[in-house]
Image: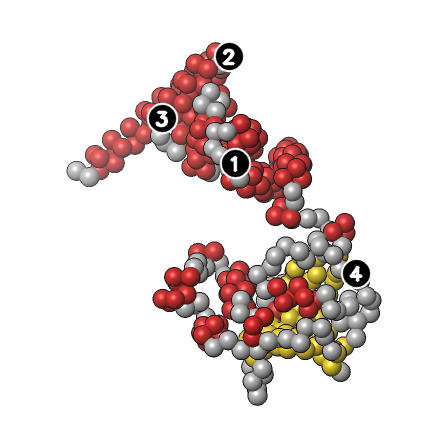
Amino acid sequence: MDCGQSDTNILKTIVHAGTKVVPFRDGTKVKFHYQTRKCDESRTLIDDSRTQQKPMELVLGKKFKLEVWESIVQQMALHEVARFRCDRSLVMQYPFVSKTIRDAQKPREERKHCCGMTVQNEGIGYKDLDELFTNPQDLEFTIEILSIESPEEYEKESWQLCDTEKRTLVEKLRQQGNAAYKANNLAAALESYSYATGIIEQLMLKEKPNEPEWNELAQMKVPLLLNYSQCKLAEKDFYAVIEHCTEVLKYDPNCVKAWYRRGRAQAGAWNFDRAKADYERAAELDPHLQPAVRKELAKLQEQQRLRDLEDKLKYQKLF
């Protein structure tokens, strides 16, 4: 059954009627499976979302790179299956969208950035997509609508939130992380702190470094970095602790917790001189820490003595 469309560049054929007509508006999330085929005699298959890890999710009104997908899903009902033949002028971006989706299935280290210069010199990185990019043609999409959710029916991802909503989410994630840490669920705590830190970093990119708004965000980031480093200290991931505490000290050079935790991490990593310096700076900033620092320095001295003795024995065995 062919259905006439106002856009003559799109021809729709219903394969299976839908069960419910749902109104669409900006922010609506549509989840669907798709097949992409060439419009040649053999209807050559290019992509099939069912062979990938999950269906496609599209949030309307977010300027998705392949605009025609936003147009065609809004012509469909819930659970409908339909084929859309789209003119080549509407699918010029498809090779890049397909590359992004395919690359997402690969380990991060295998993904390859694809700028205009790379495409010109090396291609997109997939033979069939290179051919499609070089020789644009009409494409046929078979779409099956799995779900349609209005903006109120699902939890938004961070990129969909306004800045105020992002700040609220950061605080929620911090509290979730704290609760997970108290329950000794370090993995969940790390995930919450890491997610919250990433949101703040997005917000900081919009601001000019060292301006009031940027400094305010940096101070929101400090407790998250400290909490993250505390989890990593419990896991004995000393180099991660050093890295995150060092970042804290860029924002707040007088942060006692950062000096003290970095000192513990330096000791764990056998960086004795650096550990001593960090402990002494923590005690200098907070005299109440002096008894604890004296104990840690005594431990350091014993660690150093044992390390020297071990090295001496190894040296003797050589001769």
Q: Which structural element holds mark 4?
A: loop
Residue at left offset 47%, top offset 77%:
135
Residue at left offset 55%, top offset 30%:
213
- Residue wearing tag 1: 207
- Residue wearing tag 4: 23
The disc placed on residue 149 is none
The residue closer to the viewer here, 110 or 279, is 110
Q: Which structural element holds mark 3?
A: helix
How much space separates mark 3 and mark 4, taking CA atoms? Answer: 62 Å
Tell me the crowding category of disc 3: few under 14, some 14 to 19, or many 20 or more residues within 10 angstroms, Cα based.
Answer: some
How much space separates mark 2 and mark 4, taking CA atoms? Answer: 63 Å
Location of residue 70 in the rendering, given as x and y in whole percent from the top left corner: 66, 63
The residue closer to the viewer here, 105 or 126, is 126
Residue at left offset 68%, top offset 58%:
60
Location of residue 306 in the rendering, given as x and y in whole percent from the top left corner: 33, 27
Tell me the crowding category of disc 1: few under 14, some 14 to 19, or many 20 or more residues within 10 angstroms, Cα based.
Answer: some
- Residue wearing tag 3: 274
Residue type at mark 1?
Glu
- Residue wearing tag 2: 288
Residue 187 picture quarter = top right
Residue 203 appears in the rendering: yes
Residue at left offset 74%, top offset 81%:
2
User: CB of mark 1 within 8 Å of CB of mark 2?
Assistant: no
Residue 233 lies, with reference to residue 73, above or below; the image says above
Q: Which structural element holds mark 1?
A: loop
Q: Which structural element holds mark 2?
A: helix
Residue type at mark 4?
Pro
